[in-house]
Amino acid sequence: MKRFLIKLGVFSLWGLVPLLVLLGSYIYLDPFMVLRDYRDFSFPYISPDLDYVSTEVFIKNDPKYHYNSFILGSSRTMAFKPSSWVRHLPKGAHPYVFAASMESVYGIYIKLKYLDSIKKPIDNALIIYCRDVTFNKTANEDGHLFIKHPATTGESKFNFQLTFFKSYLSPVFFLNYYIFKITKTYKPFMNGYIEGKKVKYDTVTNAITIVDQEHEISTKPAAYYAIKKDLFYDRSEERTDTVPRIQEKQLFMLKEIQRILEKNKTNYKIIISPLYEQIKINPQDFTILKNLYGDHIYDFSGKNFVSVDKTNYYEVSHYRPIMGDSLMNIVYR
């Protein structure tokens, strides 16, 4: 029996070796850039957790730059450049893009709640709501692309890090990651795991720039849209969303957002994104938003001067900074 137990113990230890090797490689490579401090998150080859990037850069840089003006919303905030926004703001504004991929009303709420809790001035705010994603989630999310930073959620740092390690162990991610590491070549099947675009993050404002696509559109627009002609599907006339998306939990968070903004005497604007789909926000939802935010809210959903023209978009989800400038000119005029 003693000899058997010794053999069993040795076997068990050997069984841990693969896991220890995987853990060691994960710590050494830090593929998601969540284990160590980074000055610049630009040009990642692993699709990053934008919520983590935004929160981490804010925490690290705020003592130096003293941010007091915030752009909040999904990755569509890339259309609203701080360098353009600041021209509409009073002197002394220090803007920061506090964005997250597929950002929800929950994410916007906890970020404002966090800023308020640390007594951060919120002098100006530009908030981007999107008909298709903003009201879908009312709690933290799983997965390495969408989980929220523990600083804003107050949830376990260990569980946060465990989420990324589990994603690393996923066979699909593991395979895509190491194929790219070996070949140094992006393939379409890697989408969602490997970043296929050159994405730059401003180290001060956290503004996002899709470098290649903006350059291609600026220099060879006809060629760019010819290649993507199948992506930009034909649309019928404007439709209206028939599903009311603001329910009890969403309404609570929307009211809290309004309360925090009013408490801080924030000069704020809320824009409902102009999406290529040309679907108008549900009338019941818009009535709720209008009753809460009054003249602070601007609805650009549906068919309008932005959504009518495909050249205003990188693809069917993200509109370009030239359109962000136009929208800011309207809401701040």
Image (tube, rainbow, N blue to C red):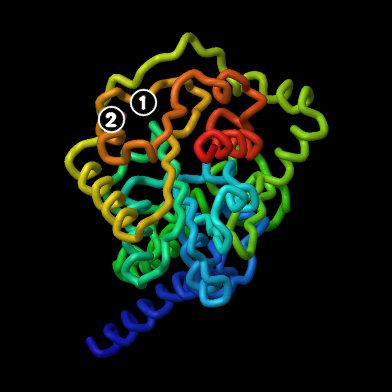
Marks 2/1: CA distance? Answer: 7 Å
Q: In this view, does 30 lie to the left or right of 103?
A: right
| Residue 111 seen in this snapshot | yes
Amino acid under disc 1? Ile
Disc number for residue 285: 2
In the picture as drawn, the residue positioned furthest to the bottom comes out as: 2
Front-most of 111 and 143?
111
Above-or-below relation of 214 to 204: above
- CB within 8 Å, label 2 to label 1: yes
Above-or-below relation of 109 to 308: below
**What residue is rendered at 29% in x and 88% in y?**
3
Q: Position of residue 328 (x, y in %)?
A: 55, 39
Q: How crowded is mark 2: few (under 14 residues within 10 Å), some or many (20 or more)?
A: some
Q: In this view, does 165 lie to the left or right of 328?
A: left
Above-or-below relation of 331 to 261: above
Disc number for residue 281: 1
| Residue 22 seen in this snapshot | no
Amino acid under disc 2? Asp
> Could you say which quadrant of the image residue 15 lies in?
bottom left
**What residue is rendered at 48% in x and 56% in y?**
70
> Could you say which quadrant of the image residue 128 lies in?
top left
**What residue is rendered at 36% in x and 57% in y?**
265
Front-most of 202 and 70?
70
Mark 2 lies on a secondary structure that is helix
Mark 1 lies on a secondary structure that is loop
Q: Position of residue 195 (x, y in %)?
A: 61, 48
**What residue is rendered at 77% in x and 27% in y?**
221
